[in-house]
Image (cartoon, rainbow, N blue to C red):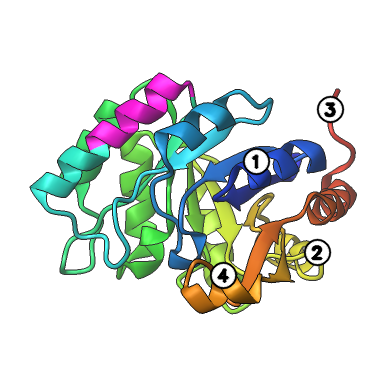
Amino acid sequence: MRATLEVCVDTLEGVEACVEGGADRIELCSALPLGGLTPSPGLMRAAAKCNVPAYAMIRPRQGDFCFSECEVALMLDDIAAARDAGLAGVVLGAATADGLLDERTLAALCEASACMGRTLHRVIDTVEDRLAAIETAVALGFERVLTSGGALTVLEGKDALAAMHTHADARIEIMAGSGVSTENVEAIARSTGIRSFHASCSEAMAADDRLARFGFTSPVERRTSARRICEMQAVLQRISGPKET
């Protein structure tokens, strides 16, 4: 199985870097420092025009994944916006207060995104039983699950990632994310069997001091790097061989 790279971005510049660097898929967000929120309709439409499949994060706010009926209605509208924009898929997640996936909400979101690709996001890292959550994701028709194995980083969660990959048994793709880099991706692939990876491939850049003082930006900005995407893909090609043409 060829190793693949999904890159998370929250700007048009990031989308362009994914095209230049050769990402296999884009996770399209706003507010990446908060774990990613729903992108604007304009950014969705712009990303749909690029040659890389883009999946929109559907998450209306920061914080937990226990959504009210009003928030679910908002998420349904955002899924419709992603569909209307022509995006390849959506990234979904919802949980209950007692540490389970919210199957009722997820079923509604999946029904609304029928015929689109679907990724279950790292809400799975917040639930008590990740293997049971995989079964729910399979039953609901998700393509893949993004996870760190319930840890802060993939390196810390590598044993759990291996167990999740084995449990999935090719019924659903397990995609490793959180702290994936060119320095560790080969070791993660070797120790877990996973061949699907999610990363920011970003570089830190000093922000304009005046803008930072006004609060219009953080003191240090992170920007998606086409060079880093290329470097990551070079490592993944060593794992699985060259891309098919």
Mark 1, Cα crowd under 10 Å, few <14 / some 14-19 / many 20+, is many
Q: Amino acid at mark 1?
A: Val
Q: CA distance from mark 4 to mark 2?
A: 32 Å
Is residue 186 visible to the viewer in this orientation of the structure? yes
Q: Do callouts 1 and 2 mark residues in contact (Cβ within 8 Å)? A: no
Look at mark 4 in the image and give the residue it sits on.
211
In this rendering, position of residue 179 left or right of residue 65: right
Q: Is residue 109 magenta?
A: no
Q: Which quadrant: the C terminus?
A: top right
* Mark 3, residue position: 244
Q: Earlier in the sequence, mark 1 or mark 3?
A: 1
Q: Secondary structure at mark 2?
A: loop
> Tag 3: Cα neighbours inside 10 Å, few (<14), some, or many (≥20)?
few
SS for callout 1: helix
- Residue that carries the numbered disc 2 in the rendered image: 182
* Residue at the image position 66 percent from the left and 47 percent from the top: 14
Alpha-carbon distance for marks 1 and 3? 22 Å
Q: In front: 46, or 193?
A: 46
CB under 8 Å between discs 4 and 2 = no
Q: Residues within 10 Å of mark 2 (few under 14, many from 20)?
A: some
Q: Amino acid at mark 4?
A: Leu
Q: Position of residue 240 (x, y in %)?
A: 83, 45
Q: Residue at x 39, y 20 (%)?
A: 84
Residue 94 is situated, as x and y percent measured from the top left of the image, at 26, 53
Mark with earlier residue (3, 2):
2
Amino acid type at circle 3 is: Glu
By secondary structure, the bulk of the magenta-drawn segment is best described as: helix
Stretch of the chain drawn in magenta: 76-86
Marker disc for residue 15: 1
